[in-house]
Structures are given as C-alpha cells and as structure tokens.
Amino acid sequence: MHIPFSDKLNFFKFSLKKNSGPLSIGLIFIIIGVVLMCIGYFIADNNFLIGFGFTFFSFSGSFLLYTMPSSFTHYYEQALTKKYGKYSIAKVIKKRVDDYSYTSNTFESGQLKHYEEFLYVIEFQFDHDHTTYYNECFFEDKTIYDAITLDTPIPIKFLRNNPEKVTVRLRKLSNDLGLSQSSK
C-alpha cells in the first residue's frame, strides 16, 4: 500500500501541531541560552554568563532531542492509524504473568525488603489478508487481565499496510468486559 506524499505531509503537520507546545517552550529556552552566551561573550566578557547560557542551551536541547522523536513518532502513527487503520477482533492464545519482583536492602534499617512487581501479558493472534499475525499486550492492572479468558475477543486496530503495528483498544475492551474506566 502506497501512502501519498500529501497524506504523509498532513500526518507530519498533525504531529507538529500536537507537539507545538513543548517544542515552543524548548525553543524559547534554547534561545535564552544562546542570548546569554552571546551577552557573556560579546558584551560583558563574563565566563559565568557563557557557562550559564551553555548549560541552559545544552539541557534544553538535550531534553528536546530526547523527547521529541518518540512524541513525533507517536502522533504521526496515530494519524496514520486513524486514516489507514483497520479494526478487527483478535483471539487470545496465551496468558502469562512475568514476575519482576526483587529484594532490596533498605538504607534506614539495613534489612532486606521484598518488592513484588508483576506484568500481565496476553498473547493474541488475528488474521489479515490470509495471513495470521501474532502479538502481545502488557497490562499493569490485574483486573483487566483476570477478566480476560482464552475465548475473550480482543478488539484491536492495526495498520493495513503494516499489520505488525497493532494496538489493543483498551477502552472498548474494558467496556466489553463490563469494567469501569477507573479500573484501567
């Protein structure tokens, strides 16, 4: 499936619009850092202003470089899925609980403390264009996991041109299972 350039441009604009707030704030901080460095170097001959401006500039820039790519990708894929996505029902094939519990030494008392952490995993399959695709979904909340059985239909949305990109529709799943929104 070929996606026209105009659609890609529209998806980019949507992503840019959704990220405009954090991007604008980050750019303001970068500009403030550059202005402080210029004042410190050209006008005041002050190493403190240069260092402070560089710190301002580098923290803001690294924050933007760290957060913006994933946020841009998220909103781009959201727009892509909205236009080219397909709704379907998946079949649960396996349930498992991954145990990430650990024991740690506390600083105050010097005693070992056990922390229990579990990740609830549902493995599912669905068919698209005579091909079966397999994927999994992770839940931190045990109530949804417990309500799902092997015969529970899982509402999903996936890209028609890339069926490996699949999202479980959690709100619809919760409604289908009769769970309140607060239990998610």
Image (cartoon, helix red, strand yellow):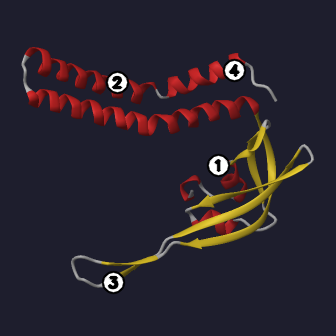
Numbered mark located on residue 112 in the image: 3
Q: Could you tell me residue 18's position as x and y percent?
A: 51, 28
| Amino acid at dot 3 | Leu
Return the disc, 1 or 4, that comes first in the chain's sequence: 4
- The residue labelled by disc 4 is 7
Residue 171 shows which numbered tag?
1
- Against 156, residue 13 (above or below) is above
The residue carrying pointer 4 sits among few (fewer than 14), some (14 to 19) or many (20 or more) residues within 10 Å by Cα, namely few
Q: Secondary structure at mark 1?
A: helix
Q: Are marks 3 and 4 in contact (CB under 8 Å)?
A: no
Q: Residue at the right extreme?
A: 130
Q: CA distance from mark 3 to mark 4?
A: 56 Å
Helix, strand or loop status at disc 3: strand
Q: Nearer the viewer, mark 1 or mark 2?
A: 2
Q: Earlier in the sequence, mark 3 or mark 2?
A: 2
Q: Earlier in the sequence, mark 2 or mark 4?
A: 4
Which residue is rendered at x = 57% and y = 56% of the image?
A: 184
Quadrant the N terminus occupies:
top right
Residue corresponding to mark 2: 27
